[in-house]
Structures are given as structure tokens and as C-alpha cells.
Amino acid sequence: MSDRRSETAAPSGPAEMVRLAAIARRFYLEGRSKVEIAEEFGLSRFRVARDLEAARADGIVHIDIRLPERLDPERSERLREAFGLRRAIVVDTLEDPLETRRALGSVAARLLAEIVRPDEVLGLAWSRGLQAMGAEMTELPRCTVVQLNGVLSEHTEAGGSVETVRRVAALSGGPAYPIYAPLILPDAATAATLRADPGIAAAFARFDRLTTAVVAVGGWDERNSTVYPALSPEARERYSRMGVCAEMSAQLFDADGNQVRSDLDERVISISADQLREVPEVVAVAGAGDEAKALAVGAALRSGLVSTLVTDSAVAEVLLARKPRG
Amino acid sequence: MSDRRSETAAPSGPAEMVRLAAIARRFYLEGRSKVEIAEEFGLSRFRVARDLEAARADGIVHIDIRLPERLDPERSERLREAFGLRRAIVVDTLEDPLETRRALGSVAARLLAEIVRPDEVLGLAWSRGLQAMGAEMTELPRCTVVQLNGVLSEHTEAGGSVETVRRVAALSGGPAYPIYAPLILPDAATAATLRADPGIAAAFARFDRLTTAVVAVGGWDERNSTVYPALSPEARERYSRMGVCAEMSAQLFDADGNQVRSDLDERVISISADQLREVPEVVAVAGAGDEAKALAVGAALRSGLVSTLVTDSAVAEVLLARKPRG
DNA sequence: ACGCCGATCGCTCATATGTGCAGGAGTGTA
DNA sequence: TACACTCCTGCACATATGAGCGATCGGCGT
């Protein structure tokens, strides 16, 4: 069952170890076949095979899998398996949360450059993390870039959704469909009116042709969400009582990943969860947060909407600890 | 011809790298076959093979050969090949030469425990390095231990040849044949008389039954030799003019490894070079010295008497630099 | 001396893997 | 459009490797 070797090293003397090292070098570093090595050393190929096993068991041969740029291969793999994702990319958590967010943005940017094919229709939601992604993006095939939701007025100072969409589209050389409207409106009627606006309708019209969407995952508290602080205390509390624990593009989800429908759905200018579900590739970028954020990410993953997750080691660790088996 | 990969890493984005890392982990760390991996990931086995190549070329898979206890596998191997030795064992040179010498002694001690079979006849010469070896020795199969040469009176304070032979024999549980005589005598007649002494003759009688001999290599100057300082200035200069550059068990050699015969041969109580040549396994322990010492070791190796060398990285480096090709 | 035991070796045969090559998709150019 | 070119794929076939097994050998107790 187990194939971990943790024997105490050196079962034999220095001559044997040097011999094993020489054989191991031939095989692992110089790429010789065991048959060749056997001929060179005057041994049977079986002897060589057993020597190589011994060299590994004794820790003479040391193999590790490492990724450049602070990527975490092990948690990436475990996370992908545990949540049945198409891809999971985990970056090492850094001391400074802002640095971690920047690293997430950088990796997400390069991920898009990698997976987006020419002439795709790319949808972008907004968060501080996605803003960082926009800033880090340096190349992208020509494609259509569509904004997935309205603007949070609280977060326009550093450049909001519109600026990110424009920048990414310009980089790609394709058309942009920004949404000039607030994310959250006081009532459904106002929202409906805005959706009829030609510019906004043009963006909404692309939602069911999206090939790739990038969204953020928010929690349901002050620290881990951009939507939560934009609501009245009464509304916050009401949604909390409905079990809301995560938010993606202003769509609410409970801890099991079920969508929590509410009046908010009608009051926001955003792609809907159902539309998101039809997008072949949904990339969620979420990390640089505390344990509550990790729980929100777990809820978002359980919704089944996400196909690719970009997060950091700390969040991944919490997710893996809470979910021993799928 | 070359198989070194030194490409710049990351030809692709993070998703691909994480994917390669996952495949590499399966293959190299979990020991799955490429066919299994191909089935799991829905790829052809050829694709998996190419992915694994890419993972190695990109530096995602990192394999290195390392030995415990400050052994240097690469130089060991190169030295063995360059000089056609049966074995070469190189220990890392340490800051303190005394520590290096101790390390050499320790490794040589464990080497003897490893290669000496029960009932062998083991010959021991003397040097500060071999003294360290005697001190570090902790186990040895039962065997006969024969002293190979007389005692240098200058070096008896810390325990000389006789003590080392006795200690090793006691450890092994076998008989000891020490030599109670000086190494160098004023004239051939005295030496001949001593060789007739029953105790000394008993040791000499074992010389042609030796199965393993351990010798030290000395240079031909104050710092790197124990014999040189024991001679008169006139004798030192005379041998120098004869091209002497190395000494093993009071046998002299020039830079090409040719034995330099002289009156000294008749004046020493020691195994002869010719007798040494008949010993199936001759272990030379030499290191913890400067460049002149390294040259002496090279000369000793070229004599063809040595089958196994124990030395340190600094000496090995000099030897390899001076001798690019055999 | 005898025979038991464990360790080690090299064999056979089934599997896994490498090599060279031909076909097909995309791409830039005449 | 036709063409040449590159890149990538998967195949057939030779080779390398792994799994299990019987033979052999040295130690060791009776």
C-alpha cells in the first residue's frame, strides 16, 4: 500500500555507496539504460536494477518535483482531485497578503494567456484580485472581452471593472463590452431599465456566447467581500440568515454551494448563476484571505460552476483539511 | 553528444506546469507506469512520455545524486575513471585540515570494514592519516594484521604503527604482526640484521600472503611527508635530484610513477614496491594536503600499485585538472 | 558431516518503453 | 488556391524493464 521509503540510510560502507552513486548517475542523470550500465560494470541487468532500487531506498537518489515562481504542485494536484476541477493552481502564500494577491493576479494573468484561444469570448467579473490580474496581464490572443457585472462605486478609485476590461481588450486587440452602471441598485425596476440600455444590453447579449469567464469568490463578511459592505446592515443580516456564505459575481451561495435566490438577484447588474453555468470554462480567482474566505471558496467550488481555481496555499490547506474525501 | 538541459524554464503557463508536475509526481514519486498515467489523464502513453521529457527539460523534475557524510560522488567517479582505479572515494574537504584528515580516517576505517573478508591478511603502513583511521575503526572481521614497515621515531608520541596494528588486530580478533624497529636505519647492514630478527621476520614472512594493504602517500617536502624530515639534508637533496616526488611506505617514485631505486631501499625496514604490487588490493589513503601533496598522489597512482584511493575533494580536483584524459 | 535456512543470483516471460516514421492540422507565402 | 513548411500526433516494431521463480551458496545448529 505504501511506497514511501524512510529507512535509515547507509546500510553499507563508503565503497558501496560511491558505487551506487556512480550507477545512479549513469541511469538518472546520463540517461543510460540498465543494460548498458550492466555491461559497463560487468553486472547483470538485474543487479543494476536492484542497485538502483537500493540507491533510491538509501536516499542516494533524490527526486523532487518543484515549480518555479512559488507554485505549489502538491496542493494544486490534491485540490484538483478533491473537488473534481479541471485545473487547480495554488500559489505559495506570502507574508504580505497584498503580495499574495499580486502573485495570484500574476498567475491568473499568465493562465489566461495560456488557455484563451484566439477569437474566444472572455468575460471578466471584478474584485481586487482580478484588478491585480488585469494589471499583471502582458499578453493575450485577440478576443472579445465582456464585462460581467456593474461597478461597485466604493472601489472605483484604484480602477474598477471598466478599466480592467478596457485594458485587457486593448492588450488582446479585440473588442470590449464594458458595463457603465452600478453593480447594485435600490430596486428591480431601476435595474431592469438599465439592462435595456443599449451599451449594457450589448454586454449582456454576449453572456451566452462566453467561452471563458473569470470570476472572484467573496465571503460574507466585511473582510472577505466587496458586495457585503455595499449593502445595508438590514440586508446583510437578512442574507446571512438565509445561509449565504459565498458570493460570485453578486450571485449568492450557501455553504453547500446551492444558489441562494433573493431580491438581490433582480437588483444587480450582473451575469446570472445559470448563465455562468453554461460557460465552458469558469476560472475562479480567490485567495489572500482568512479561514472564512477559504470556506467561501469551498462553497463556490461545491456550486459546480467553477472549472478552474486559482488560489493560495493557506486557503488550499484549509479546503483540503475540511474535505478529506470528495 | 551533450545531454545537459539548461533551457530557460517555463515555456508555457502555470496550468501546463501544474499539469506536468502532477504527471511527473505520478511517475517519479508514486512509481506509476506511463501507461497507467496515460489512462488516468486520458492521454496516449506517447504524450505522457513527452510530457515527462518536457518536465525534466523545464526543471520541474529535479534529480540529484547525493551521498551522506560528506562524500563527493562526482569526483569519486571521475577519479576512478581517470586513473583506472578499482575504487575511488572522495570526501569533501573541510575548513580545518585536521578535520579533513579525521574524515579521511573515518571513511577509510569504514571502507576496510566493508571490503575486508574474514581470514584475510591485512597490511598496514603508517601515516598521520592511517593513525586517524586506526582511531576511527570500530569493526572489522577477524583477520591477520601485519605491520608493513618500521616506526618513525619522530612520530611515536601520538601512537605509531605498532599501536595502530595492535588496536586493529584486537578489534578484529585476529593475530597481530607488529614490527619493533625503526623505519630508517643508518646503513644496509643494520637493516639486514634487523630483518633477521624473529619478530620482524615473522611480519615480513606475511608480506607475500597479504590480501589487502593500506598505505599512505607522502610528498617530497617538509609539509607533505613523514619520511622526508627524517632524512639528512644531504639525502633529501640527493633524492630530489633523482626526481623523487612521492613516497609510499618508504618506497620512492618520480612524477611518472616509476619507482626510484636508491640506497634508501636497503636502509629501510619496509615492504618493497615489488611485494606491494603482488597484493590484490592496495588502498591508498592520502589527502588533507596542498597541491604538492596532490601531485604526489598522482605519481603514486601512476605507479599502478594502488587499486583503491581514499582522498579529499581538493586533492581530487587538482588531480582531475592536471589529467584531463587518461 | 549433514541438512536446514535465508539470502542472493540470474532466468523466463509478460509488460512497459523508446525510436523512427507517416499522416494531418495549422500557417505563412507565392 | 496551391504549396511548402512546421509542429504534433499516434503507430509498428525493437528494446528495455519488471515480476515471479527455481538454483545456488554460505552460515549454522544438530
Image (cartoon, coloured by chain):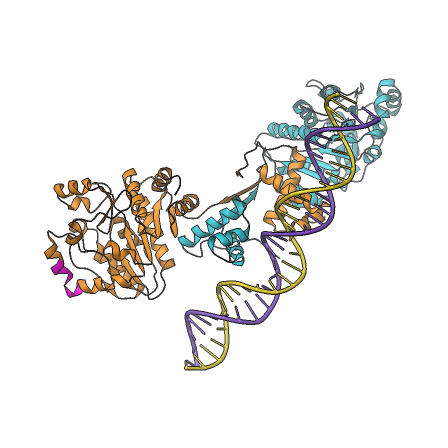
Chain colours: A cyan, B orange, C yellow, D purple
| Tally of numbered discs | 0
- Whether residue A75 is visible to the viewer of this picture, yes or no, is no
Q: Is residue B146 above or below residue B79?
A: below
Q: Position of residue B200 (x, y in %)?
A: 18, 62
x 16%, y 50%: residue: B264
Q: Is residue B104 above or below residue A216?
A: below
Residue closest to the eye, A9 or B262: B262
Q: Position of residue A302 (x, y in %)?
A: 76, 41
Q: Quadrant of residue A83?
A: top right
> What quarter of the picture does the N terminus of chain A occupy?
bottom right
Main SS, magenta residues? helix
Q: Is residue B198 magenta?
A: yes
Q: Position of residue B178 (x, y in %)?
A: 21, 61
Residue closest to the eye, A236 or A100: A100
The residue stretch that appears in magenta: B192-199
- Whether residue B144 is visible to the viewer of this picture, yes or no, is yes
x 26%, y 58%: residue: B275
- On the rendered structure, is D24 left or right of A143? left
- On the rendered structure, is A68 left or right of A128? left
Q: Quadrant of residue A71?
A: top right
x 86%, y 20%: residue: A194
Q: Is residue B137 above or below residue B254?
A: below
Q: Is residue B261 magenta?
A: no
Residue closest to the eye, A27 or B60: A27
Residue closest to the eye, A193 or B44: B44
Q: Position of residue B23 (x, y in %)?
A: 65, 44
